[in-house]
Amino acid sequence: MSRVLVVEDNVNLALALRHSLESDGHVVDVVGDGHAVLARPTGEPLDLIILDLMLPHVDGFTILRGLRARGDVTPVLILSALGEEVDRIQGFRLGADDYVVKPVGLVELLLRVQAILRRSAAAPGPAAAGRHVVGDVVVDLGARTVVRDGRSLEITPLEFDLLACLIRNRGRAVTRDTLLAEVWGFPEPRRVRTRTIDTHVATLRSKIEEDPTRPALILTVRKIGYRLDG
């Protein structure tokens, strides 16, 4: 049973989210103020935070930045009416695991929640082990570390899973459907319409590519998906 914190100041939406999540078997807490999130004890266990961005007193970006700055690695799913690409990229750069734009169907939202919880619960198995050199980046799949020029990179769990999937298929084009199924955990990826993959790839490129505007490692395969070279 997973414990989920919903940070949402719209009372009707917060109640709907609580009902859906509890019906799916989760224990749910709801707060409508950003201060309440940052004031929670760091040792209080949570499996997921669903975070609105436009909150009273403290906005969601500030909350996410504060959580990551104090070493809180609880998975965060941003649920916001802010749908511009710059907002999504900002969320992912601050350490969000997923970004969903309102309005969204509750079924899709629950699928995204389930996918995040599966990823965070999964321990690396024998197939995940191994050290790989990608350009000037060293990726250790077992230790889940990414190092470039001797410096550890700040990679979110979802970004690491995306990179690991590309490494396992190195030199081959990986379709968006495959990435949605293997990284995001969607059982029926063709029913999911999202630019989440492209946004995550852009953020990952900004961290591992020498020139993200002219990528040499993660290449776009037009109308198909992505391929890892290097």
Image (tube, grey):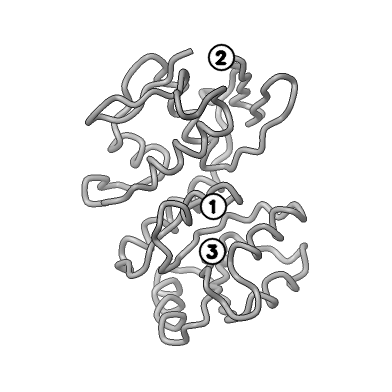
Nearer to us of marks 1 and 2 is 1
**Residue pictured at 55% horizontal, 53% vertical:** 96
**Residue pictured at 71% horizontal, 60% vertical:** 66
- Circle 1 — which element? helix
Q: Which residue is mark 3?
A: 1
- Circle 2 — which element? loop
Judge the density around disc 3: few (<14), some (14-19), many (≥20) Cα neighbours within 10 Å: few
Alpha carbon of mark 1 to alpha carbon of mark 3: how far? 31 Å
Q: Which residue is mark 1?
A: 90
Judge the density around disc 1: few (<14), some (14-19), many (≥20) Cα neighbours within 10 Å: some
User: Residue 106: which disc?
Assistant: none
Nearer to us of marks 2 and 3 is 2
Which is nearer the N-term, disc 1 or disc 3? 3
Judge the density around disc 2: few (<14), some (14-19), many (≥20) Cα neighbours within 10 Å: some
Residue 203 at what x, y percent from top left?
Answer: 51, 39
Q: In the picture provided, is 48 more to the left or to the right than 199? A: right
Q: Nearer the viewer, residue 74 or 25?
A: 74
**Residue pictured at 54% horizontal, 52% vertical:** 90
Which is nearer the N-term, disc 1 or disc 2? 1
Q: In the picture provided, is 181 more to the left or to the right than 97? A: left
Q: Amino acid under label 1?
A: Gln
In this view, the residue farthest toward the bottom is: 11
Residue 143 at what x, y percent from top left?
Answer: 66, 29
Q: Which residue is mark 2?
A: 135
Q: Is the residue 111 above or below the residue 21 in the image? A: above
